[in-house]
Amino acid sequence: MSRTIPVMKFLVMWQIELSLLSREMAGAVARMPEYGAPLARAGTVLARYHVVGGHGGAWIYDVDSHEQLERLLALAPVYNFARYTIYPLADMAPDAQE
């Protein structure tokens, strides 16, 4: 019997903590596209958005576990400069439950 690993999707909203504004933070923000591109190619990040009028973004992750998500967030260049709000997502398509 083959066992499939359930897919877990998360909406991750991150917002830069402006009180930490520095050259290091600016560099971290500038590295986010470079960090996200291979994740997007691998299908680990399904979408990346800038929040208009804000200082941050909204990314949708498709991971095998919450531990994997935690590792990916910790590797993000802005990890030490941002606040994160994480929403688990549930697929509402009728065939998603099969």
Image (cartoon, rainbow, N blue to C red):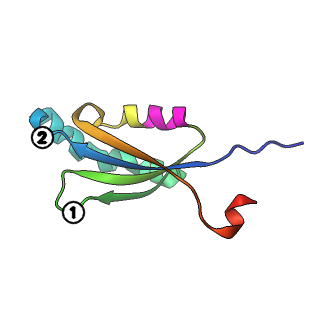
Residue position marked by numbered label 1 in the rendering: 52
Q: Position of residue 67 (x, y in %)?
A: 53, 32
What is the CA distance from the residue labelled 1 to the residue labelled 2?
A: 16 Å
The quarter of the displayed image where residue 51 is located: bottom left
Q: Position of residue 9 (x, y in %)?
A: 53, 50
Who's the residue at 21% across and 63% down the image?
52
Is 69 within the magenta? Answer: yes
Q: Looking at the image, which is closer to me, 10 or 25? A: 10
Q: Looking at the image, which is closer to me, 78 or 51? A: 51
Left or right, residue 13 beside residue 25: right
Element class at badge 1: loop
Element class at badge 2: helix
Please identify the quadrant where the C terminus is shown.
Answer: bottom right
Left or right, residue 53 beside residue 92: left
Helix, strand or loop for the magenta stretch, by majority: helix
Who's the residue at 38% across and 31% down the image?
74
Who's the residue at 60% across and 41% down the image?
64
Q: Looking at the image, which is closer to me, 48 or 58? A: 58
Q: Amino acid at mark 1?
A: Val
Q: Amino acid at mark 2?
A: Leu
Left or right, residue 85 beside residue 5: left
The stretch in magenta equals 66-72
Q: Residue furthest bottom?
A: 94
Residue position marked by numbered label 2 in the rendering: 18
Who's the residue at 22% across and 46% down the image?
30
Q: Is residue 59 above or below residue 25?
A: below
